[in-house]
Amino acid sequence: MAMKKINLSQVVAVGHRDRDDILEVLVERNNEFEYVEVPAPCEAYSGLQDLSAAIEPTVVISLPDQPAELRQLPAASTSSIAGLDFEMRSVRSTMAKAVGYNATEQVLQIEFKNGSVYQYDDVEPETWTELWESDSIGITFNDSIKGHYSSKRCR
């Protein structure tokens, strides 16, 4: 097998936009950030996740052909906002960093990529399961949660 040396030291972050198969790359050049889009299937992004996991073993790989519980990352932290406890789970999503659900109070909590945290009231367990098991957190959020439940910004 032929191998080629590549330098990825300027790559800061990589994401994948599933709706149009675009690999999103954030590159740092001369103390400035450049956003680059490259047409690539989700498998390319999964391959980069595999590479990251090989280099940094604490990173959990999420592959689209695995069961839903393995596509998402494991529980990230426990959060207590507004007196409710949530087991926040990191997710692979372009819109959210983590999601959590308090089954007793039926409150869904979402931490968005911009750092804001919202809670959605009276969310049925089935809706939480639908969100957690979905292939796209963003699409399920927009279709089934946003505008369907009362919400409040917590942070």
Image (cartoon, rainbow, N blue to C red):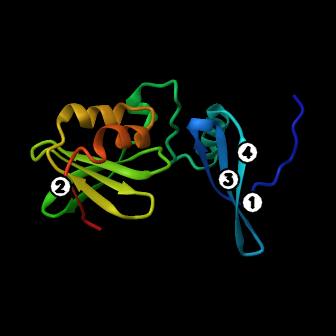
* Amino acid at pointer 1: Ser
Mark 2–mark 4 CB contact (< 8 Å): no
N-term-proximal mark, 4 vs 3: 3
Q: Nearer the viewer, residue 139 or 98?
A: 139
CA separation in Å, label 3 and label 1:
12 Å
* Amino acid at pointer 3: Val
Secondary element under disc 3, as helix, strand or loop, is strand
Q: Position of residue 50 (x, y in %)?
A: 61, 38
Q: Which residue is mark 3?
A: 25
* Snapshot quadrant of residue 144: top left
Which circle, 3 or 1, is nearer the viewer? Answer: 3
Mark 2–mark 3 CB contact (< 8 Å): no
Q: Which residue is mark 4?
A: 38
Mark 2–mark 1 CB contact (< 8 Å): no
Q: Which residue is mark 1?
A: 9
CA separation in Å, label 4 and label 3:
8 Å
N-term-proximal mark, 2 vs 4: 4
N-term-proximal mark, 3 vs 1: 1
Q: Position of residue 111 (x, y in %)?
A: 35, 56
Secondary element under disc 1, as helix, strand or loop, is loop
